[in-house]
């Protein structure tokens, strides 16, 4: 239900930035006479985000309130929790805690504000007896701590029988106004902080009130002005809410480090002009995957001792997985050994649909080196990564992909069981864990979640692609992959509409998807490329995606995978009839042309429209760049190479925040991504994410409490904060690093092939 409008004024982020472009850090809000709401989305107007709950609950928003069945047979109040984290408390301030609640029978619950972690010391721990009539309850308390990360919870466990709980208008009012967060955006001249290729595009953006073209100067590290010109006014940019001009210095072909651009009295961060700017990124972006591996000790001699850790989830206490994982209650009566694979992201779940797309992008990055004219043969070969399999005569990127492929196949329902051949959607903790948490210390029960058609086809596609690439290195493994893929494909056709539940989101993400036509197309495409089988060709030609436009402006993603099939059909040798193949290739070029149009319309020069900054937007941008780069591979036309390279500028700092989203790349880069493993921000003994880890990036609809509180009213490019609590703008994830790895490998090739 909607709450009455707040009376206090909020400073919009855009206004704050316009007022104080060079100001920095968090300015504490002053004590405010008007009440300040500390709970986000307490009226459930925006669905369930950012609330969380224990794994035995499946809450839903119904009629503007949240209702949930509390299962019977639990013992403690905390056996069934609905709550919200990151509630800031200020010592000595008084708070009004109120909510409206009802139950299907009279029952007692606890309404709590407390520490989020052990020993869970409470500010208020209020027993309330609910009735069947919705009733508003109000309490007051005074905080005795300064803690930005308290939790508000309704603990409803302990009943012998199930009952229904409904909540609405949950509020904790008091304390101080949320700080006005003003990011430190540094100099107003924004460049790719890593640099530019000598024969690549070179464009920068200056944030300015000026509307007439601004003169600019390019200065080398010796302080000599080496080029000058006038900028091009671009007006007010929708994605950033800023007035900007662009500086094109592409006619300068000198090389070196420590260049700067000056315009409107401001000087950019330094950058290089060199054919080597992306060489290290090719391997750094891939190195992330080894460090995210589950089921194997991470060897500090390979990747630095700060990342060394024992194997996670191999059945050694306190772990309860992943060597014999049961299903969620009622889903199956067997256990599976699903040890291995990669941890998905900042959490330690393993999800087939996301593992599949990430694996496919690694396999695709390798496969591109076999087909693309500009690819450097061997650049992704054996002994190019620091992995335990280095030196085994198999390309290291394939070794890395194999780690996940084996996991994906292990998620398949065994022969003889109901739904044999289908693939479990995911395995993860029963309940969400706190941060930090090293994988080997995770005490949560792990569970297999129901098979889904999407996961089954995702595995089929990735395994079919893996089969053709492993054929010459390990035919036994290749055969195993192909068999698993074919079995999965047949099972999916027999069960074409088993969808992962949008409500199955505790302890792990949902990765829900109710349109699997694209997964069918992708799997058929990979199986056809690998086998040439008539059945797969028939299915492909019958797919609505065979000839439709699969290149949406927002880009492909784990949920929308038809583009993966289309790109492979266009680039990997296959037996499509000649005219059909020509149409497939033309469609990729048409998709790239669309992205070039979008890029030209964006002042910051990236292929993403202003209305498409979603959770993980950096990967959407990179995936669009992959399409553009593929058009270059297909046509050799310079405009595609140029656009693909220019699109990367945004990732490395030519953006509203003057921020590079790749750890260790550029003057100011993401360091505090949401992760339980590299949680340096919470524990100084832990490392930051490894160099080459990309953050999810700007999300115009932030879904975590910290970002919701600090980024209110943000223009899309400002909807990002490099804080470990902001999982909806600043997490690490395998499908984001795989997108980076594909594009990094392409970009590194563009440098290698320069004459310079
Ligand atoms: O850590 C989780 C992150 O990996 C997910 O992307 C995110 C959304 O599914 O959820 C995070 O977990 C939070 C949970 O949703 C609510 N309780 C706090 C958890 C840690 O911040
Ligand atoms: O990348 C996913 C994004 O597209 C979704 O909008 C979001 C919320 O459902 O979940 C993201 O995936 C997270 C997953 O659910 C749990 N592991 C961390 C993933 C990255 O945040």
Image (cartoon, grey):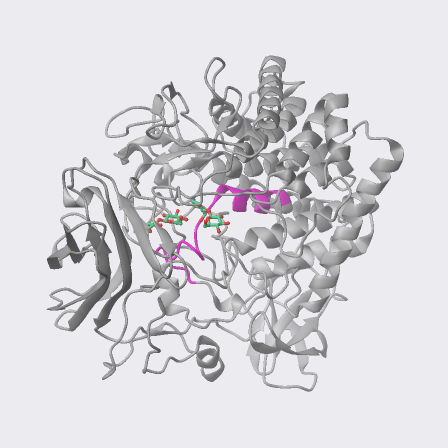
- Picture coordinates of residue 169, whole percent (x, y): 28, 65
The answer to whether residue 649 is above or below residue 312 is below
**Is residue 614 found left or right of 332 in the rendered image?**
right
Q: Quadrant of residue 47?
A: bottom left
The answer to whether residue 379 is above or below residue 220 is above
The answer to whether residue 259 is above or below residue 356 is below
Which residue occupies the foreground of this view, 153 or 711?
153
Looking at the image, which residue is at 66% across and 40% down?
A: 564
Question: Could you tell me if residue 532 is visible in this image?
Answer: no
- Picture coordinates of residue 368, whole percent (x, y): 70, 36
- Picture coordinates of residue 630, whole percent (x, y): 74, 45
**Is residue 751 found left or right of 6 in the rendered image?**
right
**Is residue 16 found left or right of 532 in the rendered image?**
left
Q: Quadrant of residue 198?
A: bottom right
Looking at the image, which residue is at 26% across and 62% down?
A: 87
The answer to whether residue 515 is above or below residue 85 is above
Does the magenta run of residues contain 734? yes
Which residue occupies the foreground of this view, 338 or 651?
338
Check the image and name the residue furthest to the right: 579
Q: Quadrant of residue 487?
A: top right
Does the magenta run of residues contain 174? no
Question: Could you tell me if residue 528 is visible in this image?
Answer: yes
Label total for image: 0
Looking at the image, which residue is at 14% across and 38% down?
A: 75
Image quarter hosting the N terminus: bottom left
**Is residue 487 found left or right of 327 in the rendered image?**
right
- Give the magenta range: 721-742
- Picture coordinates of residue 653, whole percent (x, y): 55, 63
């Amino acid at each position: 239900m909607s709450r009455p409008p707040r009376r206090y004024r909020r400073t919009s982020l855009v206004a704050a930035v316009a007022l104080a472009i060079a100001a920095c850090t968090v300015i504490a809000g002053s004590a405010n006479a008007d009440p300040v709401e500390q709970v986000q989305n307490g009226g459930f107007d925006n669905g369930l985000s950012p609330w969380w709950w224990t794994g035995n609950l499946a809450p839903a928003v119904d009629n503007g309130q949240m209702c949930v069945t509390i299962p019977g047979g639990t013992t403690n109040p905390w056996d069934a929790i609905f709550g919200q984290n990151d509630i800031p408390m200020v010592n000595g301030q008084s708070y009004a805690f109120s909510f409206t609640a009802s139950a299907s029978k009279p029952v007692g619950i606890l309404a709590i504000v407390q520490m989020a972690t052990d020993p869970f010391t409470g500010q208020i721990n209020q027993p309330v007896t609910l009735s069947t009539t919705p009733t508003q309850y109000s309490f007051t308390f005074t905080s005795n701590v300064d803690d930005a990360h308290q939790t508000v919870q309704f603990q409803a466990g302990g009943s012998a029988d199930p009952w229904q709980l409904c909540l609405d208008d949950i509020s904790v009012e008091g304390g101080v106004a949320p700080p006005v967060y003003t990011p430190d955006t540094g100099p107003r001249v924004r460049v790719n902080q890593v640099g530019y290729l000598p024969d690549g595009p070179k464009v920068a953006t200056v944030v300015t009130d000026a509307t007439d073209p601004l003169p600019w100067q390019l200065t080398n590290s010796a302080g000599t002005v080496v080029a000058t010109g006038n900028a091009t006014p671009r007006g007010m940019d929708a994605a950033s809410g800023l007035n900007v001009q662009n500086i094109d210095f592409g006619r300068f072909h000198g090389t070196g480090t420590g260049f700067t651009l000056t315009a409107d009295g401001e000087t950019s961060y330094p950058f290089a002009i060199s054919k080597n700017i992306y060489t290290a990124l090719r391997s750094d972006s891939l190195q992330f995957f080894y460090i995210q591996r589950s089921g194997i000790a991470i060897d500090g001699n390979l990747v630095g001792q700060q990342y060394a850790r024992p194997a996670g989830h191999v059945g050694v206490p306190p772990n309860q997985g992943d060597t014999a994982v049961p299903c969620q209650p009622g889903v199956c009566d067997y256990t599976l050994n699903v040890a291995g694979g990669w941890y998905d992201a900042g959490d330690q779940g393993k999800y087939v649909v996301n593992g599949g797309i990430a694996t496919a992008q690694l396999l695709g990055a390798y496969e591109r080196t076999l087909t693309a004219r500009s690819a450097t043969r061997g650049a992704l070969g054996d002994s190019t990564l620091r992995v335990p399999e280095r030196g085994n005569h198999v390309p290291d990127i394939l070794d890395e992909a194999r780690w996940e492929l084996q996991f994906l196949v292990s998620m398949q329902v065994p022969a003889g069981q109901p739904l044999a051949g289908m693939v479990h959607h995911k395995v993860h903790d029963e309940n969400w864990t706190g941060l930090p948490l090293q994988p080997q210390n995770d005490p949560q029960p792990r569970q297999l979640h129901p098979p889904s058609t999407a996961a089954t086809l995702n595995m089929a596609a990735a395994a079919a692609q893996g089969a053709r690439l492993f054929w010459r290195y390990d035919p036994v493994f290749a055969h195993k992959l192909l068999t698993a893929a074919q079995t999965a494909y047949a099972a999916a056709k027999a069960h074409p509409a088993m969808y992962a539940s949008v409500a199955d989101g505790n302890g792990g993400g949902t990765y829900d998807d109710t349109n699997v036509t694209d997964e069918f197309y992708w799997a058929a495409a990979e199986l056809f490329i690998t086998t040439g089988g008539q059945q797969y060709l028939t299915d492909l030609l019958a797919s609505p995606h065979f000839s439709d436009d699969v290149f949406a402006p927002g880009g492909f993603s784990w949920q929308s995978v038809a583009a993966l099939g289309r790109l492979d059909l266009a680039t990997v040798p296959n037996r499509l009839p000649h005219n059909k193949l020509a149409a497939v290739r033309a469609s990729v070029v048409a998709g790239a042309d669309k992205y070039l149009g979008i890029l030209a319309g964006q002042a910051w020069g990236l292929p993403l429209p202003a209305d498409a900054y979603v959770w993980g937007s950096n990967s959407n941008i990179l995936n669009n760049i992959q399409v553009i780069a593929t058009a270059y591979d297909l046509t050799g036309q310079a405009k595609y190479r140029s656009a693909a390279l220019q699109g990367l500028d945004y990732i490395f700092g030519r953006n509203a925040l003057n921020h590079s989203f790749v750890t260790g790349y550029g003057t100011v880069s993401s360091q505090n991504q949401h992760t339980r493993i590299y949680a340096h921000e919470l524990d100084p003994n832990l490392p930051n994410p490894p160099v080459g880890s990309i953050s999810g990036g700007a999300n115009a609809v932030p879904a975590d409490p910290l970002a919701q509180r600090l980024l209110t009213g943000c223009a899309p490019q400002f909807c990002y904060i490099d804080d470990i609590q902001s999982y909806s703008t600043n997490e690490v994830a395998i499908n984001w690093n795989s997108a980076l790895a594909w594009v990094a490998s392409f970009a590194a090739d563009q440098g290698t092939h320069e004459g310079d």
